Amino acid sequence: MKYDRDEAIGKATGLFWKLGFQGTKMRDLQEHLDMRPGSIYAGFGSKELLFKEALNLYTQQSIHQVRHYATQYDNALTALYEFVKTQVINSRDSSQPKNCFLAKTVAELDNNNAEISLWAQSGLNKIEKEFSVVFKQAQVQGVLDPHADCLRLAKWLQVQIMGLRSYGQLQVSKEDMTDMLDQVFSSLPKATPIK
């Protein structure tokens, strides 16, 4: 039976994101991908390698979204704000899990799966670097303090997103979530206007 590799990775990503690495059994993959175990092993090598493919896909999709928002707005901080809003507020209405797949993976895995945990951490680092690029654009545009450490701000933003996404799983109104998001962005070091 033929299968579309990209489609299979996409389906596996959704399943792994929902159930986690340890919670996803080969039988789950077989049913969800409509593939036999031999086909899964032949196509991906192992559950671990398929999981890494899923982490890669999630990372690339996240980076693509950040870049997309950066091209849609003249103000780079507005672009980041809208990206984060989509991740932490608008996504609450979707059927996707609410936590970041990469952060969830790091939190789930123990020393027995250290290599996969490091793979997920690498994905988080790549997304942080993309945030850093957008923060640098904001400096060029004159809306962010030119002396701000963009990579440090990117790490800080990643922490804020993780926290907001986790907190958003509670019965919190969209208005309260928006207020918290506004507070996050109002605390960024803005550029001092030239007098």
Image: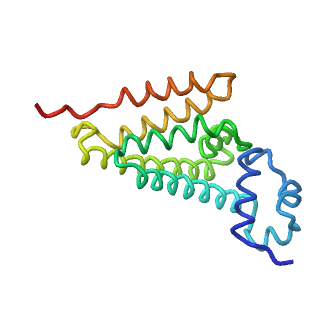
Residue under the point 61% across and 54% down: 58
- Quarter of the image with the C terminus is top left
In terms of image quadrants, where is residue 99? top right
- x, y percentage for residue 13? 70, 55
**46 and 128: which one is in front?**
128
Colour scheme employed for the rendering of this structure: rainbow
- Quarter of the image with the N terminus is bottom right
Residue lying furthest left:
195
- x, y percentage for residue 96? 71, 44
Vertical comparison of 119 with 4: above or below: above
The image shows a total of numbered marks equal to: 0
**92 and 148: which one is in front?**
92
In terms of image quadrants, where is residue 168? top right
Residue lying furthest bottom:
2
Q: Would you say 189 lies left or right of 88 here? A: left
Q: Would you say 180 lies left or right of 57 here? A: left
- x, y percentage for residue 43? 75, 72
**152 and 181: which one is in front?**
181
Vertical comparison of 74 with 35: above or below: above
Q: Would you say 34 lies left or right of 58 here? A: right
In terms of image quadrants, where is residue 92? top right
Vertical comparison of 71 with 132: above or below: below
Q: Would you say 2 lies left or right of 14 here? A: right
Residue under the point 77% across and 44% down: 19
Residue under the point 30% across and 44% down: 138
**194 and 171: which one is in front?**
194
- x, y percentage for residue 61? 57, 56
Vertical comparison of 162 with 79: above or below: above
Residue under the point 56% across and 21% down: 176
